[in-house]
Amino acid sequence: MIINTHSHIYDEAFDTDREEVFQRALEAGVEMLLLPNTDETTIKPMMEFYEKHPDNVRVMMGLHPEEVYKDKEDKRFADKKDYKEKLRIIEEEVPRLTARNDTMVGIGEIGLDFYWDDTFKKEQIEVFSEQLHWAKELGLPVSLHTRNAFREMFKVLDHEQDGRLAGVMHCFNGTYDEAKTALSYGFHLGLGGVITYKNCGVKDFLAEIPMERIVLETDDPYLPPVPYRGQRNEPAFIVKTAEKVAEIYGVTTEEICKITSKNAKSLFKL
Ligand SMILES: [Zn+2]
């Protein structure tokens, strides 16, 4: 049985066949899907999917770093809400969801992303830090998104880690040193389809990372593993990632599924 720690199955990419996609995941051995939120517009579809499958789904609440921008100052975002308003809407959901059993298991996905530009670097850091505070106060793990931002990410963690932060460096694609640093802050590495790519550097040192510190994910509908590159990714494809990770560690796929599920269960208190 597999726990998929990062799936956006509520995304509109699955609007035409979401239930079939979910059935395929169950058939592939996925027993639990963790759904990170993205912005204020994704809360509704995410919760609708959760209500349909409360035995196999858990949610996380958070504002994605790519959704942090100010509408007034940039006409590209003229039709979007200001990030502060988005954050307030998401914050309001948190007590509602924590009051329910077996529903919300983390804060995510949150983090820093300076891939396209770093115009809102200051705002991203501010929003990220605020959400880390929620996690610490609630004792919840986080799902961290880091793209072109490890330096800044570790700077924030250095300031914020007081022993209360735990979570996943989702879709980890950094260097060996970055992996070691992430582990030193108490984080797990989230491995997805990227680990199956020829040019992925993580597979060269993964065997040196303790198996107790990795979890599996898909980040669907993005980043499909080989042999599905170019297609829409889906939760069932996690099996291909599990197979690759098992090959790297020289253990069976079953064993990797067992260990990573155990890790996810204890981290997210499933
Ligand atoms: Zn994601």
Image (cartoon, rainbow, N blue to C red):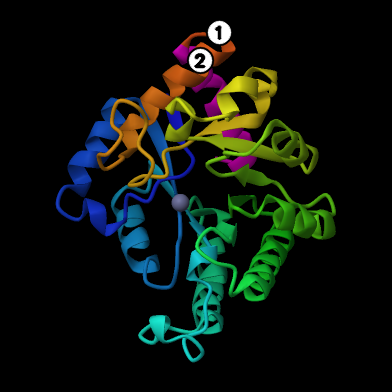
Residue behind mark 2: 246
In this picture, residue 231 sits left or right of residue 31 = left
* Picture coordinates of residue 8, whole percent (x, y): 37, 51
The answer to whether residue 265 is seen in the rendering is no
Occupied quadrant, residue 75: bottom left
| Residue at x-position 35% and y-position 25% | 29
Name which residue type carries label 2: Ala
* Picture coordinates of residue 184, whole percent (x, y): 80, 38
Q: Farthest residue in the bottom direction? A: 72
Checking the image for residue 250, the label placed there is 1
Name which residue type carries label 1: Gly
**Residue 47 lies in the magenta stretch:** no
Q: Are marks 2 and 1 in contact (CB under 8 Å)?
A: yes
Occupied quadrant, residue 180: top right
The answer to whether residue 98 is seen in the rendering is yes
Q: Height in image: 231 above or below 135?
A: above
Occupied quadrant, residue 1: top left
What residue span does the magenta drawing correspond to? 253-270
In this picture, residue 3 sits left or right of residue 220 = right
Q: Height in image: 7 above or below 77?
A: above
* Picture coordinates of residue 13, whole percent (x, y): 24, 53
Element on which disc 1 rests: loop
| Residue at x-position 58% and y-position 61% | 114
Secondary structure, magenta segment, majority class: helix
| Residue at x-position 34% and y-position 27% | 226
**Residue 254 lies in the magenta stretch:** yes
Element on which disc 2 rests: helix
Image quadrant for the C terminus? Answer: top right
Question: Which residue is nearer to you in this view: 176 or 14?
Answer: 176
Question: Which residue is nearer to you in this view: 139 or 245?
Answer: 245
Using a 10 Å C-alpha cutoff, classify the residue at mark 2 as few (fewer than 14 neighbours), some (14 to 19) or many (20 or more).
some
* Picture coordinates of residue 234, whole percent (x, y): 30, 39
